[in-house]
Image (spheres, grey):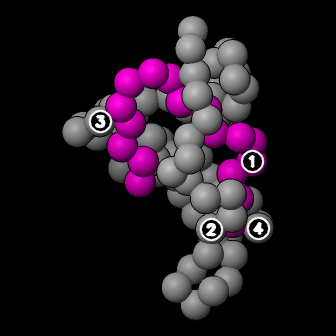
Amino acid sequence: MSVSQSSVFNVQNFTDAGTPLVGGRLYTYAYGTTTQKTAYTDNAGVVAHTYTSDGAGGQYIGLNARGELPAPLYLLSGSYDIA
């Protein structure tokens, strides 16, 4: 499996007020759809990120108290939509 590290998603994310985006949500979709496409924590594409249900049918990766992902973000080949 071939994966690459995304350069789209910032290491630390902030609100419009400039504070860390605590509890932020990162959704990873197959391009042009709302179908979840898994992101990985390792460059081998073996360990998937932990996704949490949003209660409305979506799955997201939760940001930590610093507004950061809990682990690096690696993506499979092909296109993603990241929200």
Q: Which contiguous range is marked in magenta?
A: 67-83
Q: Secondary structure at mark 1?
A: loop
Q: Nearer the viewer, mark 4 or mark 3?
A: 3
- Tell me which amino acid carries mark 3: Tyr
Q: Is residue 80 magenta?
A: yes
Is mark 2 in CB contact (under 8 Å) with mark 3?
A: no
Question: Could you tell me residue 83's position as x and y percent?
Answer: 41, 54
Give me the C-alpha separation between circle 2 and circle 3: 22 Å
Name above or below for residue 46 compared with residue 52: above
Quarter occupied by the N terminus: top right
Q: Earlier in the sequence, mark 4 or mark 3?
A: 3
Residue at image position (69%, 76%) is: 20
Q: CA distance from mark 4 to mark 3?
A: 28 Å
Residue 70's disc is 1
- Mark 4 vs mark 2, CA separation in Å: 8 Å
* Residue 56 x %, y %: 36, 50
In this orientation, which residue lies closer to the viewer: 77 or 26? Answer: 77
N-terminal-most mark, 4 or 2: 2
Residue bearing the label numbered 4:
66
Q: Name the residue beneath numbered marker 3.
A: 31
Reply above or below: 31 against 60.
above
On the image, which quarter does residue 22 sit in? bottom right
Taking depth in this image into account, of 62 and 46 the one nearest to the observer is 46
Q: Mark on residue 13?
A: 2
- N-terminal of the two: label 1 or label 2? 2
Q: Earlier in the sequence, mark 1 or mark 3?
A: 3
Kindly give the residue lying farthest to the top in the view shown: 1
What kind of residue is marked 2? Asn
